[in-house]
Image: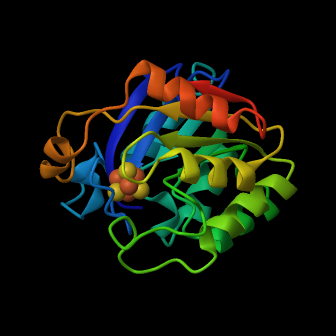
């Protein structure tokens, strides 16, 4: 595993669970508002997998879960093995994903290696532009949405209210695709240290009333909250 960082204690990232977070390195997306630009590309290995496992061994009984975030965790070839080791130590595992590798998420679910998935939806799942996903996606995002909806694994959908990707039409399209009982959380992007600094000058942050309007568009389809 290429690990770019470890947060040793969080009560915010895994619903109802006190846990830690590992951030994997490498992403196949180029969201201009990404606030983890240092994780999008490989930059060496500040934290080894051995260190993470040693940390988890020592914290058994004090922490209950591990969040695997990124970057994009599903690009790591040994993600399943890493989840298996973590589960073997008694931890619950949550994976944060951009949804581009449905086959990886399906495999992790089928093998019982993960307990929670947070899927970031960036725009209408059927129409990701090259600006977000330079390599193209086909039906990958909609496949991941459907895998989660069919599974018994707890999950949530998340959306960063960032123009021009999120607007009333794309919000309705993604809410319609994700429709069901799992929640959708709307969040603003963090303006500090983003992947494409020019993005800040081109688009304004949404106002509270913009966020509320987006929430109202999604609410007929699934529980929707502003974070
Ligand atoms: S915000 Fe976009 S570019 Fe950044 S890690 Fe997530 S999917 Fe990758």
State left or right for residue 44 relative to residue 216.
left
Quadrant hosting ligand 1: bottom left
In the displayed structure, 61 sits above or below 74; it is above
Residue 155 sits in which quadrant?
A: top right
- Quarter of the image that includes the N terminus: bottom left
Quadrant location of residue 41? bottom left
The answer to whether residue 221 of the structure is visible from this angle is yes
- Which residue is at 27% across, 54% downward? 32
Question: Do we see residue 64 in this rendering?
Answer: no
Give the residue displayed 52% in from the left and 22% down from the top.
12
Residue in the picture at 39% in, 47% down: 23
Q: Is residue 200 left or right of residue 19?
A: left
The reply, left or right, for residue 48 in relation to residue 108 is left
Residue drawn at 52 percent across, 64 percent down: 74
Q: Is residue 211 above or below residue 158?
A: above
Q: Whole-percent x and y of residue 223?
A: 74, 30
- The x and y percentages for residue 14 are 60, 30
Q: Which color scheme does this rendered protein use?
A: rainbow
Q: 54 or 110: nearer the eye? A: 110
The image shows residue 32, relative to residue 161, as above or below, that is below
Residue placed most toward the observer, 140 or 103 = 140
In the rendering, at what x and y percent does residue 56 appear?
51, 36
Give the total of numbered labels: 0
């Amino acid at each position: 595993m290429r690990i770019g960082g470890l947060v040793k204690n969080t009560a915010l990232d895994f619903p109802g669970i006190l846990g830690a977070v590992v951030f994997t390195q490498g992403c196949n997306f180029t969201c201009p508002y990404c606030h983890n630009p240092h994780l999008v590309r490989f930059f060496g290995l500040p934290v080894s997998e051995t260190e993470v496992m040693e940390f988890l061994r020592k914290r058994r009984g004090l922490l209950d879960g591990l969040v695997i975030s990124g970057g994009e965790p599903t690009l790591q070839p040994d993600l399943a093995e890493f989840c298996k080791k973590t589960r073997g130590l008694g931890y619950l595992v949550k994976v944060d994903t951009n949804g581009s590798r449905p086959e990886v998420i399906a495999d992790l679910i089928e093998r019982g290696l993960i307990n929670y998935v947070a899927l970031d939806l960036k725009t209408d799942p059927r129409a990701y532009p090259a600006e977000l996903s330079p390599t193209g996606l086909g039906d990958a995002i909609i496949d991941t949405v459907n895998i989660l909806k069919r599974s018994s694994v707890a999950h949530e959908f998340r959306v960063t209210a960032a123009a021009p990707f999120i607007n009333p039409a794309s919000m309705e399209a993604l809410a319609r695709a994700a429709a069901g009982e799992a929640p959708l959380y709307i969040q603003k992007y963090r303006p500090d240290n983003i992947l494409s600094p020019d993005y800040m000058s081109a688009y304004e942050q949404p106002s509270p009333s913009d966020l509320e309007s987006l929430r109202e568009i999604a609410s007929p389809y699934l529980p929707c909250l502003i974070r």
